[in-house]
Amino acid sequence: MKVILREDVDKLGKLGEVVDVRAGYARNYLLPRQVALKLTADAEKQIEAERKRRTVREQKKLEDMKHAAELLNGRSVTISAKAQEEKLYGSIGAEEIAKALTEEHKVFVPASAVVLEAPFKTLGTPDVTIRFAEGAEAVVKVWIVAESE
């Protein structure tokens, strides 16, 4: 049975591709979950419209990420942590940095966007790269200071 995919499916195809699958797979899995449509002229038009909307949505998302990267580039954030001399009792990782950036600069930063080789375990002022997407990157300075009691 020939179907048109409405979304990307692993090991089968991408959005808008016409694929030939067994009738049972189409009838019992793809069609009920609205992952695919039977191959018709109307279905092809519908899939093309969905593809255009998806492209526009992805472009807007990329633009938003680039704008966020521009806002954060060159900025700094201060994180206070318990420390003894120069060593932290715990560590400062991607989640803490993302949370501090979101709170201080009012720009949502997912923890997955923070690029770290390893969590910071000492006081200091390292530079951290924030990679929202390919071409949407920012470098921020993280001030890790001892918590005042």
Image (cartoon, rainbow, N blue to C red):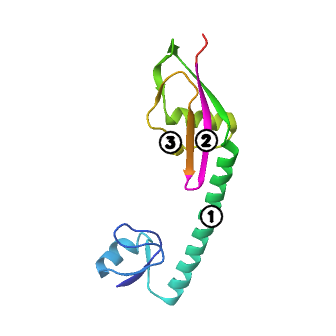
**Residue 84 coordinates in the image, percent (x, y):** 49, 12
Q: Which comes before the other along the chain, label 3 or label 1?
A: 1
Where residue 59 is drawn, which disc sits there?
1
Q: Does the magenta stretch include residue 88?
A: no
**Residue 23 coordinates in the image, percent (x, y):** 31, 81
**Residue 20 coordinates in the image, percent (x, y):** 34, 82
Which residue corresponds to the image point at 65% horizontal and 53% vertical from the top-left?
66
Three-letter code, disc 3: Val
Give above or below for 136 relative to 143. below
Read off the residue under disc 3.
115
Three-letter code, disc 2: Val
Q: Of 2 and 13, which appears nearest the observer? A: 13
Q: Give the SS element for disc 1.
A: helix
Which residue corresponds to the image point at 52% horizontal and 16% vertical from the top-left?
82
Where residue 139 is drawn, which disc sits there?
2
Where residue 23 is drawn, which disc sits there?
none
**Region of the chain picked out in magenta, as a range:** 133-145
